[in-house]
Image (cartoon, coloured by chain):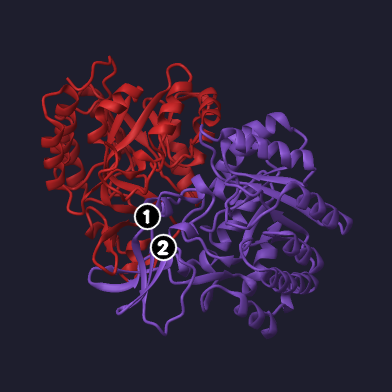
Chain colours: A red, B purple
Amino acid sequence: MLTNSQNTPRLTLGPILYHWPREQVLDFYAEMLETPVDVIYLGETICSKRRLLRPEDYWELAERVAAAGKEPVISTLALIESDGELKTLQRLCADERFLIEANDLAGLDYLEGRPFVTGHSINLYNQRTLAFLAQRGLKRWVLPVELGRETTAALIGSRPNGVECELFAYGRLPLAYSARCFTAYNRNLGKDDCQFCCGDYPDGLLVSTQEGVPFLSLNGIQTQSATTHNLLPVLAEVARLGVDLLRISPQSSRTADIVKVFADALTGDLDLDQGLARLREWCPSGLSDGYWSGKAGIASGTVV
Amino acid sequence: MELVCPAGNLPMLKAAVDQGANAVYIGFRDDTNARHFAGLNFNDKQIREGLNYAHDRKVKVFVAINTYAQPNGWERWTAAVDRAADLGVDAIILADMGVLDYAAERYPNVNLHLSVQGSATNPAAIRFMHRHFGIKRVVVPRVLSLAQVAHLIQEAPVPVEIFGFGSLCVMVEGRCLLSSYACGQSPNTFGACSPAAHVEWRDTAQGQETRLGGVLIERRSHDEPAGYPTLCKGRYDVAGELRHAIEEPTSLNTLDILPGILAAGVSAIKIEGRQRSTRYVSQVTQVWREAIDACQRNPDAFRPRESWHQILAQVSEGAQTTIGPYHRPWH
């Protein structure tokens, strides 16, 4: 067994952060329903111009997720600037069938007074923010990704009853958002004429340093890490701390296998070293874990 | 429209006041503010002197406590709010919802502004912060076009302040972790982007290298000028091409669109640069005072003077300036 403590974190699947073809998205979720994730987050969180799936499509997917015995959560846009984006958010929040993840402060305005989730791009850094949001209806928070074990432990130690803590446990780190579309910028296209070129990069557009070290991954208006953040080495620790949920962020291939590695490691059916060896094979730009130990996010091998 | 100028120390505060700022913003000497640089910022004695100097001349003083408190260190943020309130500053500029909640409960009569680091870019976000914390003003992140700013002003429940000049953050402020990804410290957690202690400059055969946390963020030939070492302004390899993958080493200058800013109903225009020099504050404040006065007298005939551009170009970081996000093609 992984741990003697009674708490075993549940696995969640974060929203797809990339612009994949509609068929690929539908196939992906059909596959994910067969995996041991307990919670599936659905929705476009990066760019309002991406409309291959509409709110209706996500709601339909959410019904299927629920029918498969998993919990669907509707995720919302991380950076809201225009009226149109605000109207879409309002519409998503007006639907009370599903739990909703707010990723911009605007979501809090619409969701206040009913149960909601805050994503990692809502700045919840301390116990007073946690208590304040809990009074507004916070049911679960995803820790901002730059925070590590010390803050996780302190927040869990002071959390109001019933509020769950979720960690971004596996995936390229969501590091920044901008008005600028960096994919279009690097293709020398204007944002208003982007030609949906982000669709050409199913895992983001790689940015390497001048000495060839993979550094960042550009995904439309979002900047991600090139490395894949990975908390597999500290599963026992996060379980002991009382973390409720661990998020795996979708990538274009091997996501189901990654889920299985985490699930088997949690039940003790897979040795951590073996699991790590598998994960390494599936992430071309390497693993990182520095944020967990309070170091640079790009650092690796810092947690144990 | 108020002109809000930066001061990293007492001489800068006095320079801003002397040159016509309507308000000056400052920070304490620790990680509770987003310009946590060695040798910068104010102790209480200096703030008292600065407050007297400014108030005698009818100029306001704001204190920025605009980083994010973690459980280990929380008392530093509440103590900073206590100090600012006790000192009688004209407003406290806050970002963290927990700190806002504390300040609003403890000091209901103190003016609270939502910092640019608070990351509120739309009316619903501002409404939420206003409803719970009674904010009196919002400083909006550098992501909106001028048309979006104008629209936001119509919808927002509080006056809107925008950045008009200085270093340009390309990312929405308060939600950029690039710095901590490379070196472990970010504006949110430490109060500085790309902190000096993590920056290395090195001359090599291939050129001058700048590293942040060991990551090579720029390598330039020896005859190219060196800019401020923020990782978003460096050159990288993108699909085999060497380029500024995020932004060129430009800074923001909105002088050319000042009539539009005025017409949009912007309540205050902010100058970036608490970490810069007294000369910078003095010259930039002087130019912007003249420009705002000229624009308010006759917005239709307003043309930025060549001398203003020359002065601003001399103190700008990097060789180029941009209207940035206010101008849609920048996006």
Quickly name the residue at label 1: B182
Question: Which of the marked residues, 2 or 1, is nearer the chain's N terminus?
Answer: 1
* Circles 2 and 1 on the same subunit: yes
Front residue of A112/A280: it is: A280
Residue B226 x/y as whole percent:
46, 75
Looking at the image, which residue is at 42% across and 82% down? B224
Residue A47 visible in rendering: no
Residue B118 x/y as whole percent:
56, 45
Residue A245 x/y as whole percent:
31, 27
Image quarter for residue B220? bottom left
| Left/right of residue B321 with respect to residue B276 in the rendered view | left
Front residue of B287/A89: it is: B287
**In this view, which residue lies farthest toward the right?**
B56
Which image quarter is the N terminus of chain A in?
Answer: top left
Disc 2 secondary structure class: helix
Looking at the image, which residue is at 30% across and 40% down? A15
Q: Numbered disc 1: what chain?
A: B
Disc number for residue B231: 2
Image quarter for residue B14? bottom right
Q: B278 above or below B176?
A: below
Looking at the image, which residue is at 11% across and 29% down? A270
